[in-house]
Image: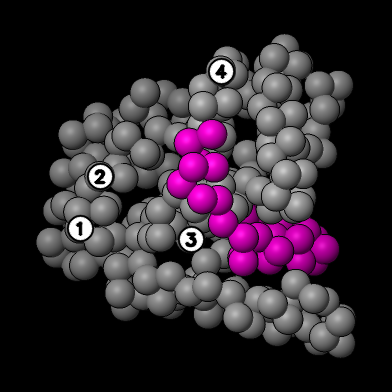
Amino acid sequence: MAAAGTMTGIGQVFASTISAKEDRTNGHSDNLKQSKDMEHRNLGGMEVSAIGLGCLPMVGYYGGKYEKKDMITLIRRAHAVCPLSAVQSEYAIWWREPETKIFPTLQELEIGFVPYCPLGRAFLTGTINENRRFQKGDRRWNLPQFQPEALKHNMPLVHLVEKWAKRKGVTPAQFALIWMLSRKPWIAPIPGTTNPDHLDDFLGAASVRLTPYEMEEFDADYAKIDLMGHRADPFPESQIDK
């Protein structure tokens, strides 16, 4: 999903969410107070909060499968017609295809990137163990990454995130966002939640970053982990350039 520069910024949406939460908590949340001083990022000329709030129903599948060169051509053609502020795609610690497929083009054209599902549909938060099972109706019930064998196989990644979260003095969810915010200054993730406490937790990631050395150290540990399962069910998987 691409956003034109004249569209409403996600920062404005996020700011209204914060205000509503402040009304409910009477301003007693430390993280919400910190959010007023949250880093702002420039996404193609649009100033937004470093962390936004995702909305899953906004995500859809448009058209057929695009090869890498076609995806880049599409971005360039759209940008030439109407300058893009940001491109939205799934991106998380355990799914990094955008880094090789579109990041170089986004950086060249000074287009921002808005990742949805930055917490790996909660897998990276440490709240899902290998015995968790999902019922039909849950978005994860038929995703390859969330099948029993894959959950068990991928647990080392959760343990790695938990180890680094402890090292940085944050929660696993916060670390997953910190990792992302430390990658590029033009990335503004939009974790989705309907839980105000989770939103409060996300805000705690706004002021912590990894150093370049820490990024290299984490990636070296990550490279040792073998992951199982694709991110999508059969239909969207057939639309994805792998």
Reading the image, the residue beneath label 1 is: 109
Residue under the image location 60 percent in, 52 percent down? 177
Magenta segment boundaries in residue numbering:
191-217
Q: Is residue 56 left or right of residue 61?
A: right
Compare marks 1 and 2 and give the one earlier in the sequence.
2
Q: How is the image coloured?
A: one colour
The foreground one among 117 and 178 is 178
Q: Residues within 10 Å of mark 1 (few under 14, many from 20)?
A: some
Q: Which mark is residue 188?
A: 3
Compare marks 3 and 4 and give the one earlier in the sequence.
3
Q: Is residue 82 left or right of residue 57?
A: left
Q: Measure the C-alpha gap from mark 3 to mark 1.
A: 17 Å
Q: Measure the C-alpha gap from mark 4 to mark 2.
A: 25 Å
Q: Is residue 26 above or below residue 186?
A: below
Q: Which mark is residue 133?
A: none
**Tag 1 and tag 4, C-beta contact below 8 Å:** no
Residue 192: x %, y % from top left: 65, 55
